[in-house]
Amino acid sequence: MFNFAAFIPRAVMQSIPLLLGSTGETITEKSGNLNLGIPGVMYVGAISGVIGSFFYEMSLEDPAQINSFLAVLIPMACCLLGSFLMGLLYCFLTVTLRANQNVTGLALTTFGIGFGNFFGGSLIKLTGSSVPSIALSATNKAFAAKLPLAEKTGVFGRIFLSYGFLAYLAIVIALVTSHILTRTRVGLQLRAVGENPATADAAGINVGRYKYLATCIGSMIAGLGGLYYVMDYASGVWSNDAFGDRGWLAIALVIFTIWRPNVGILASMLFGGLYILYLFIPTGTNLAIKEIYKMLPYLVTIAVLVLISLRKRREDQPPAGLGLPYFREER
């Protein structure tokens, strides 16, 4: 029989990188920037956190005596810095130099994956490990620490209380982002920049500043998704090219949620469940059926795109200025 008590926690853990990535990309796209470099940003955020954590653990004589606060603070600070620099680079190229956003995003994805693999491989050589991976078990314990009641409340605890703090932080970030975008003056001005930057500029809104801030903050949030994958979901183990296509799924999730971060909470859990469904449904020796199950997240995304195209409701469409460079002289 299908084991929901085991499936739901795995689906939720799988969904957190998608939720953080899609929330960050939603903020970015609301400013009119289409950042297809999110997979690279998440990769750089993850390896930056791994570098910080690696050298912190190496500095300790006994990793068992690790300070939990520093074990969380150092990799998070490194992750936020690395992903911030990726967002800053994207903005410099697309906002200041007005480079093509699609090409720039794809270039950052390639750069980010290469950057992560290079430094990840270098750290593996430093450890002298016989396997191509780094295990940061002490840091993993700090990130994956569960709530005290998780083990005492049975199925309820396993489903709702058995996650690390970044999982709950991701949900809070999504809810706060949704509130800011829809209920605050800052959110209104950000959406105005994404819809019609010329009109926003004429109204006295600093278009460049909003694009820079939204893209850099969005990149930092997405970078946390990469950090969560390594430090919590993967139990603190870094392996080159282990991310798969989660960054691209995060971008697809933005369209799936119709640019609404609060909807992204449940949508990311749905995607996370579909992503690992093949592990919980017996397929025997029929590998073709297993591959079909792996296709489900992408088939659902295509179906949603078709439905959105047919409905043609304005509130379901992307920002009008998405992906378009803004030239103030042409206003």
Image (cartoon, helix red, strand yellow):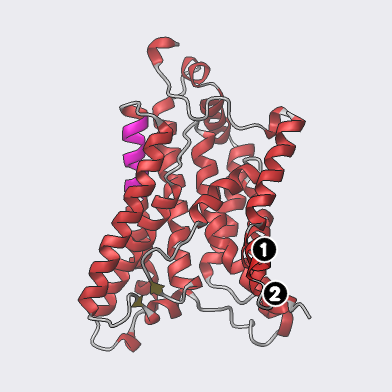
Q: Position of residue 197 (x, y in %)?
A: 49, 21
Say left or right for 198 vs 65.
right
Q: Is residue 177 above or below residue 63?
A: above
Q: Quadrant of residue 169?
A: bottom right
Residues under labels 1 and 2: Cα distance? 10 Å
Q: Is residue 64 above or below residue 52?
A: below
Residue that appears at 36% across and 66% down? 240
The prevailing secondary structure element of the residues shown in magenta is helix
Kind of residue at disc 2: Thr
Which label's residue is closer to the chain start, 1 or 2?
2
Kind of residue at disc 1: Tyr
Q: Quadrant of residue 129?
A: bottom left
User: What residue is pinned by disc 2?
Assistant: 283
User: What residue is pinned by disc 1?
Assistant: 293
Asked whether 331 or 15 is in front, the reply is 15
Q: Which residues are magenta?
A: 84-94
Q: Are marks 1 and 2 in contact (CB under 8 Å)?
A: yes
Whether residue 151 is visible here, answered yes or no, is yes
Residue that appears at 70% across and 27% down? 314
Q: Is residue 259 magenta?
A: no
Question: How many residues crowd mark 2 within 10 Å: few (<14), some (14–19), many (20+)?
Answer: few
Residue that appears at 25% across and 82% down? 60
